[in-house]
């Protein structure tokens, strides 16, 4: 059952004049080099897969989409430069899938007065969408959802009494911790131990050591990639076996490979369906078809952004102006992106949810090498 | 506490290996090859990919990785470091920084993923408090440290190396083959770099940032001990590893970022050439 | 005691348990020219280093115009117009000859707002005059000069500092006879103008006897003898230690 | 160059810059602003590394201090100029202390020693409330009007030109020569009456002040500042600008800043946006190999008088 | 005078023809040709900046040069390692390694050379002061001591050709004489397989050990001849315009 929700329906061949055949330009500023290069590249691939697919199906109103990924090496100044370039020189109609909280915030200041949309501002930081910024349409679900979801699961489902928290000491990890802490307080609990690690840490021995001393029965490990894996593996080595809960983003086959058997039973949450489940096959096929790297939780963010853009583009008819797209995006309600829970945006005055496409996450659990939805 | 110290010693050993890779080339050129960590990472990725695609054996992969790091280090030395050295070691160092920018992009091009990296097929030993791979890390580093110490401080080539460090233009003017000795140290640097990758990756996992933080810490540790002699680097890095581990363990992870660097600055203020390096007096 | 007299009073220097200077005393009066000679490693350069405070580990007293110099820093000595050169050169290699003169001259040329814009011109003029007879351009990079040329530039840089005590460490090493006699002339001429006193270390017997009124002979860190060159250079012990029989 | 030519050069740069900031398309106007901002940091790094050869990996600290002090004071509605000066003063004081403490530390040891500063400040800013913690701080715009960003860039151009001009004066004055002297021969400098400690610390302070102003202005153009400003790579970028532009040259510093900003832009224009960083790396290597003395070498090759024949112009000793 | 008259031997150690040396565009040596026979001392004198040092640098391959160099009948290219071929250089300004000890500095003199000779003993005899400073950091030595070290280091490998660039600089008159005499003696004992190229400012000293001599001015030889055929005064007036 392959239905991308976009490609199959948007393939109305263009009957417009020749000038309409000009490509529709979109672009994104992503870290394609430096330490976060792998992330940006995955996102770019996710976007490219959907764009290629749409173009193969005839484009939008017969106009092909041209996607320009730009490298900012995670530097906000470069992010802003890239954004300005796309808006100004490439005459892009929208930014689709730009990554990085700080860069997006800088860009928003420039874009807001222009009514120029970033469709799929990829940041789970609440600061991006609360208060809502006119031009930023943020994806996926924010941290105010993620942290509490994990806490609630640990307390209610796992019946944990002693919960510890480890988080990355930056604008990604710290808010997650704050929200979780609030949730804990509301449940009348305190974390038994809290540790941080630096974004570029290469090992987690200190954190593990200190967490272990607190003898928790559950650890919320707000880490990704090698840091999360390193903690999980070392914990297993030392026969330290609390319940482990992690953020969205752990769900990729490669990360599962990193932890191997040690990962069994790890609890995570996600805005997207598990990649390995059957209903995600079409995404994998797309990536394979266009010789892109395997889909991952990062690439899914790109996929999601691109799908939302196409959905909005379909609503504007022939009026491919940034402003029209911005208005159209505001009108998206319960759009089924097929890779996760539906997406809705709203008018700026609709408050917090106006600029945050997804507000739910579901718990997934690692079983036999695959993340699977929690069984109720 | 014992566990903290052991942890510190093991990570310190990894830092020391990187420190050796940095210092071998530094000893002849005064250039810190900023790209060394990134070339190691790139070679490791090439290694893991050939391993996955062609199912090469561990030994073959290891050789491949070491050869690649040697090749890259030699090329960087040949193309950038040596030609720029005439104009000063700072310019040369900034020259290597260009590779520091380029290599990660190549690595991402190879693979955007993290990988578990296999350990060398050594017999599992029951060593009680310390895992057998940690034992390997410790022993190999100590071994490299001793060899390097003998080579630099005792052998006649070591005298040549230190002569070039002392004054390169003097060395040239009396006919020492500076280029050749520099290349020898470049090869050595790459070789140690390759070994570092093989040793560290199973412990740290193979990521794009495999050498990012360790490189910085190693540099700090090496400076703490004194970059000019292997002994200084070895004990400097070990010390830093242990200090990090203990302060982290006792006072939390933020202190682990702050206290070691404070120690370094205090040491430098008191002993500008590092703990284990005697200050060479100058007279006029 | 005459004004502007430099007095070296019983200095001793021990470094790392080795005694380098033992009880050296002598004085240099205004306008006097003293040669400091002796075999290699006798401690001549060390004496200069002590006087100019580059070497601080000595015991004893060094006074200039009755002021104790012991507590001064080496960079403060140019304020007293005690100017030195180095055996192994102290020039700024990657700068031009003119820049070296500028740097040397800043102490001796009074800077004030009035002459701010003419100052450099004046220095340049004086530098040009000093270089009149040399095969050296003001725009030459120091590193592009031959060793002898560098020696000359360093000497002239010391002169442009308008010394009242000029201390030269082997200024004529690497110069030929012609350059040496020119250097002597230059020193004598400048001395008439500025009335400085001169302390010079040199291994050229001829140079020292022509230039200096008195010589101080050191051997193994000890004062061997002092006197006028004609007399001292005849002495057996000086010939044996420094001049050599076959040079005699 | 005489003072008159300096005034003319900087004056025309200023006028051109202001004109450009109003007539260039917004993207290039922004790049122009960034160039002006970075050139101050580049000059600052050059005073330290190019002139006195004190290598610092710590200048990101001053950049960050400038940015944060400015950002915080702006939000408290303090006068903008005062905010910039406050940051510069604080940076200057920190630099004075650090420069003084590390006076005996050299080369790579100094580089690593100075690294401590941004690493500490990174943790401090992350932990503080007033800095916005890990999330960073939004910087209020300087002006609120239709073409605000052009006006901002024009203001930055004015500030940068004045500071650039003053820096040139300093570099060409005795201070600049003394900086060179301490680098080239410490004992030689001492014998000429130059207080080496004083000038080395002065270079540190000067560098910090310039970098701090640069940081404040960065806040203005980018509008948002984060603890990331204290990253090592920021310092490394300053070093790259100073060295690729031209060690020991103010004009070179400007070229270095232009290089770092324009090379990626060039890649965009040629449709190679993905490869801008790769291009930057390669461009850096090639530039250094072609012009080891920096991009300024390109200019001085044209301008420099060269001796040609055998000792031709020299009088012969006779 | 220690100079000994030897029988004319046509065996040339080093043949230099049309050697020019450049620093960028500046030409410091202008097409100079000469030969150094085995067993002979060839001295070059000349004013400051005449190009003596540049000539030696050209021969040693440390400055950019054109022209042909033949050493022991083998042609040199710019890349040939002079040191390994048996030429040692005592550069002007000594070029000793200040951070290394005296001992290590001496061992640099035989770095990468297999030839094991017993030079050290002989050299310590010549420079007894060095023996007492063996483990001292070379940068701490006095100027003259450093010069001794530079000479000794060059002689450690017992080179076939010794390039001496003002080796007497900074030496006391007595020691300078001893060194020159000793070098001459060494040459005479060495069975004529060794040669010396000496640059000196002081004609007097140079004449004492030289067999052949050239006067250099502005990058060219303006006079060449047998050292025995001229006197100091003659040469001084000739090439320096010094009043006799
Ligand atoms: N800082 C120091 N550390 C160790 N030894 C020193 C130091 N300074 C001088 N010496 C020793 O003291 C002795 C005297 O040195 P000095 O340079 O004063 O001699 P000199 O008379 O100038 O000789 P020359 O004529 O060769 O220049 C030398 O043997 C030298 O090795
Ligand atoms: N590194 C260099 N770069 C450029 N020019 C140089 C360089 N070294 C020397 N020269 C120039 O070449 C000419 C010859 O210099 P050289 O050093 O050969 O003279 P020299 O005869 O050895 O003099 P001295 O007796 O003073 O040592 C001089 O005019 C000098 O300015
Ligand atoms: Mg001396
Ligand atoms: Mg010479």
Image (spheres, coloured by chain):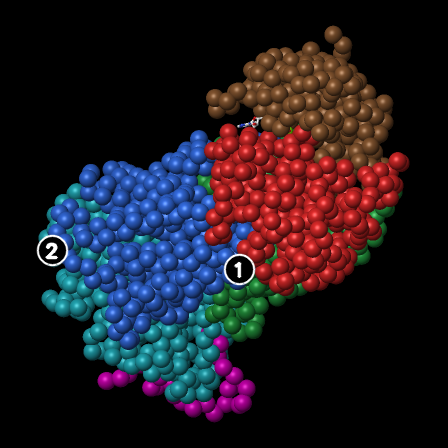
Chain colours: A cyan, B blue, C brown, D green, E red
Residue A158 shows which numbered tag?
2
| Residue A205, x across and y down, in percent | 24, 48
Question: The residue tagged with tag 1: helix, strand or loop?
Answer: helix
- Residue sitting at 61 percent across and 56 percent down? D292
E219 to A253, vertically: above or below: above
Q: Chain of mark 2?
A: A
Q: Is residue A23 magenta?
A: yes
Mark 1 neighbour class, 10 Å CA radius: few under 14, some 14 to 19, many 20 or more = many
| Residue D194, x across and y down, in percent | 65, 31
- The C terminus of chain D: image quadrant: top right
Q: What segment is highlighted magenta in the picture?
A: A1-26
Residue A49 shows which numbered tag?
none
Residue that extends furthest to the front in the rendered view of this protein: E7
- The quarter of the displayed image where residue C209 is located: top right
| Residue C191, x across and y down, in percent | 82, 24
Q: Main secondary structure of the magenta part?
A: loop
The residue tagged 1 is: B80
């Amino acid at each position: 059952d392959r239905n991308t929700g976009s490609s199959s329906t948007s393939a109305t061949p263009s009957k417009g004049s020749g000038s309409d055949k000009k490509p529709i330009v979109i672009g994104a500023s992503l870290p394609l080099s430096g330490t976060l290069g792998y992330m940006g590249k995955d996102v770019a691939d996710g976007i490219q897969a959907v764009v290629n697919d749409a173009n193969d199906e005839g484009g939008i109103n017969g106009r092909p989409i041209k996607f320009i990924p730009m490298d900012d090496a995670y530097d906000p100044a470069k992010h802003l430069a890239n954004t300005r370039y796309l808006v100004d020189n490439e005459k892009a109609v929208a930014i689709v899938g730009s990554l990085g909280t700080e860069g997006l915030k800088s860009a928003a200041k420039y874009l807001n007065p222009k009514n120029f949309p970033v469709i799929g501002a990829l940041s789970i930081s609440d600061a991006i969408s609360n208060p809502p910024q006119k031009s930023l349409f943020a994806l996926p679900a924010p941290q105010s959802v993620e942290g509490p979801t994990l806490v609630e699961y640990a307390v209610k489902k796992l019946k944990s009494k002693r919960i510890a928290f480890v988080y990355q000491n930056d604008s990604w990890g710290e808010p997650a911790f704050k929200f979780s802490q609030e949730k804990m307080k509301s449940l009348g609990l305190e974390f038994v131990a809290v540790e941080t690690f630096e974004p570029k840490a290469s090992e987690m021995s200190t954190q593990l050591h200190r967490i272990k001393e607190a003898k928790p029965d559950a650890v919320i490990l707000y880490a990704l990639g090698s840091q999360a894996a390193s903690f999980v593996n070392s914990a297993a080595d030392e026969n330290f076996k609390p319940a482990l809960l992690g953020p969205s983003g752990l769900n990729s086959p490669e990360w599962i490979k990193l932890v191997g058997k040690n990962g069994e039973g790890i609890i995570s949450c996600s805005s997207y369906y598990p990649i390995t489940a059957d209903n995600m096959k079409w995404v994998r096929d797309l990536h394979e078809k266009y010789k892109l790297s395997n889909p991952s939780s990062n690439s899914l963010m790109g996929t999601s952004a691109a799908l939302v853009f196409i959905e909005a583009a379909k609503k504007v008819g022939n009026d491919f102006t940034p402003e029209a797209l911005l208005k159209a995006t505001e009108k998206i309600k319960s759009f089924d992106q097929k890779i996760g829970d539906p997406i809705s945006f709203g008018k700026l005055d609709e408050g917090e949810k106006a600029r945050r496409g997804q507000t739910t996450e579901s718990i997934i659990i690692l079983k036999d090498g695959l993340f699977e939805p929690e069984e109720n | 506490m014992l566990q903290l110290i052991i942890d510190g010693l093991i990570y310190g050993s990894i830092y020391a290996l990187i420190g050796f890779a940095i210092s071998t080339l530094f000893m002849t050129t005064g250039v810190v090859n900023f790209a060394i960590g990134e070339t190691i990472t790139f070679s490791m990725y090439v290694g893991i990919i050939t391993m996955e695609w062609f199912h090469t054996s561990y030994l073959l992969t290891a050789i491949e990785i070491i050869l690649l790091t040697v090749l890259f280090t030699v090329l960087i030395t040949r193309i950038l470091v040596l030609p720029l050295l005439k104009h000063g070691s700072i310019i040369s160092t900034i020259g290597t920084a260009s590779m520091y920018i380029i290599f990660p992009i190549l690595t991402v091009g190879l693979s955007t993923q993290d990988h578990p990296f296999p350990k060398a097929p050594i017999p599992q030993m029951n060593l009680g408090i310390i895992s057998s791979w940690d034992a390997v890390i410790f022993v190999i580093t100590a071994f490299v440290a001793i060899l390097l110490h003998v080579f630099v401080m005792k052998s006649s080539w070591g005298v040549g190396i230190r002569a070039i460090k002392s004054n390169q233009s003097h060395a040239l003017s009396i006919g020492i083959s500076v280029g050749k000795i520099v290349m020898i140290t470049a090869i050595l640097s790459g070789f140690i770099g390759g070994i570092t990758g093989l040793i560290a990756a199973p412990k740290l996992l193979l990521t794009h940032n495999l050498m990012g933080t360790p490189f910085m810490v190693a540099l700090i540790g090496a400076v703490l001990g004194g970059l000019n002699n292997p002994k200084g680097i070895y004990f400097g890095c070990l010390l830093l590893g242990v200090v990090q581990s203990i302060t982290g363990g006792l006072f939390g992870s933020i202190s682990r970022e702050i206290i070691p660097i404070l120690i370094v600055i205090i040491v430098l203020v008191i002993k500008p050439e590092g703990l284990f390096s005697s200050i060479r007096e100058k007279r006029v | 005691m005459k004004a502007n007299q430099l007095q070296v009073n019983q200095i001793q220097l021990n470094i790392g348990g080795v005694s380098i200077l033992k009880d050296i005393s002598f004085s240099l009066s205004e306008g006097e020219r003293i040669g400091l000679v002796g075999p290699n490693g006798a401690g001549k350069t060390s004496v200069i280093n002590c006087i100019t405070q580059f070497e601080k580990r000595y015991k004893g007293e060094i006074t200039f115009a009755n002021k104790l110099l012991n507590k001064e820093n080496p960079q403060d000595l140019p304020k007293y117009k005690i100017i030195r050169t180095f055996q192994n050169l102290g020039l700024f290699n990657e700068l031009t000859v003119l820049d070296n003169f500028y740097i040397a001259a800043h102490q001796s040329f009074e800077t004030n707002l009035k002459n701010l814009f003419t100052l450099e011109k004046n220095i340049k003029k004086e530098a040009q005059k000093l270089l009149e007879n040399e095969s050296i351009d003001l725009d030459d990079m120091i590193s592009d000069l031959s060793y002898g040329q560098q020696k000359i530039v360093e000497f002239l840089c010391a002169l442009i500092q308008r010394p009242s005590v000029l201390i030269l460490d082997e200024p004529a090493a690497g110069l030929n006879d012609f350059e040496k006699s020119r250097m002597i002339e230059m020193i004598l001429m400048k001395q008439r103008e500025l009335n400085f006193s001169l302390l010079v270390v040199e291994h050229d017997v001829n140079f020292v006897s022509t230039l200096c009124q008195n010589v101080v002979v050191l051997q193994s860190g000890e004062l061997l003898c002092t006197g006028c060159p004609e007399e001292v250079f005849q002495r057996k012990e000086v010939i044996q230690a420094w001049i050599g029989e076959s040079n005699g | 160059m005489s003072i008159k030519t300096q005034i003319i050069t900087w004056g025309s740069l200023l006028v051109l810059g202001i004109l450009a900031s109003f007539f260039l398309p917004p993207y290039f106007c922004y790049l122009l602003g960034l160039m002006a901002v970075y050139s101050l940091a580049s000059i600052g790094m050059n005073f330290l590394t190019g002139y006195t050869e004190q290598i610092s990996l710590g200048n990101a600290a001053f950049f960050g201090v400038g940015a944060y002090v400015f950002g915080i004071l702006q939000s408290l509605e303090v006068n903008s100029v005062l905010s910039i000066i406050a940051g510069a003063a604080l940076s200057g004081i920190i630099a004075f202390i650090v420069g003084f403490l590390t006076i005996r530390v050299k080369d790579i040891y100094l580089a690593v020693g100075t690294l401590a500063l941004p690493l500490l400040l990174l943790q401090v800013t992350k932990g503080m409330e007033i800095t916005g913690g890990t999330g960073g701080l939004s910087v209020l715009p300087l002006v609120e009007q239709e073409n605000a960003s052009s006006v901002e860039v024009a203001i930055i151009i004015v500030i940068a030109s004045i500071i650039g001009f003053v820096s040139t004066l300093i570099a060409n004055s005795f201070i600049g020569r003394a900086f060179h002297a301490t680098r080239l021969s410490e004992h030689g400098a001492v014998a000429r009456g130059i207080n080496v400690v004083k000038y080395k610390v002065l270079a540190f302070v000067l560098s910090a002040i310039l970098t701090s102003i640069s940081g404040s202005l960065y806040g203005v153009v980018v509008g948002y500042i984060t603890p990331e400003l204290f990253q090592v790579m920021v310092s490394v970028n300053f070093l790259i600008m100073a060295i690729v532009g031209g060690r020991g040259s103010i004009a070179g510093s400007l070229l270095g800043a232009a290089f770092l900003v324009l090379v990626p832009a060039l890649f965009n224009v040629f449709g190679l946006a993905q490869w801008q960083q790769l291009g930057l790396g390669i461009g850096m290597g090639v530039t250094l190999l072609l012009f080891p003395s920096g991009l300024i070498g390109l200019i001085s090759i044209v301008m420099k008088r060269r001796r040609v024949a055998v000792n031709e112009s020299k009088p012969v000793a006779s | 005078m220690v100079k000994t008259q030897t029988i004319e031997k046509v065996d040339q150690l080093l043949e230099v023809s049309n050697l020019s040396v450049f620093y960028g565009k500046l030409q410091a040596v202008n097409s100079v040709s000469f030969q150094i026979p085995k067993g002979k001392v060839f001295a070059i004198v000349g004013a400051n900046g005449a190009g003596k040092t540049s000539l030696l640098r050209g021969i040693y391959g440390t400055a950019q040069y054109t022209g042909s160099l033949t050493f022991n009948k083998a042609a040199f290219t710019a890349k040939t390692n002079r040191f390994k071929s048996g030429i040692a250089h005592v550069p002007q300004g000594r070029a000793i390694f200040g951070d290394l000890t005296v001992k290590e500095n001496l061992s640099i003199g035989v770095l990468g050379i297999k030839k094991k000779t017993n030079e050290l003993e002989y050299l310590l005899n010549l420079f007894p002061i060095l023996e007492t400073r063996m483990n001292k950091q070379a940068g701490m030595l006095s100027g003259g001591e450093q010069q001794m070290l530079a000479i000794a280091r060059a002689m450690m490998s017992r080179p076939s050709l010794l390039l001496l660039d003002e080796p007497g600089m900074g030496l006391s008159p007595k020691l300078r004489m001893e060194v020159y005499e000793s070098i001459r003696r060494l040459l005479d004992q060495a069975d004529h397989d060794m040669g010396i190229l000496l640059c000196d400012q002081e004609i007097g000293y140079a004449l004492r050990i030289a067999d052949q001599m050239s006067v250099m001015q502005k990058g060219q030889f303006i006079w060449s001849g047998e050292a025995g055929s001229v006197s100091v005064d003659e040469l001084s007036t000739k090439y320096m315009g010094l009043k006799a």
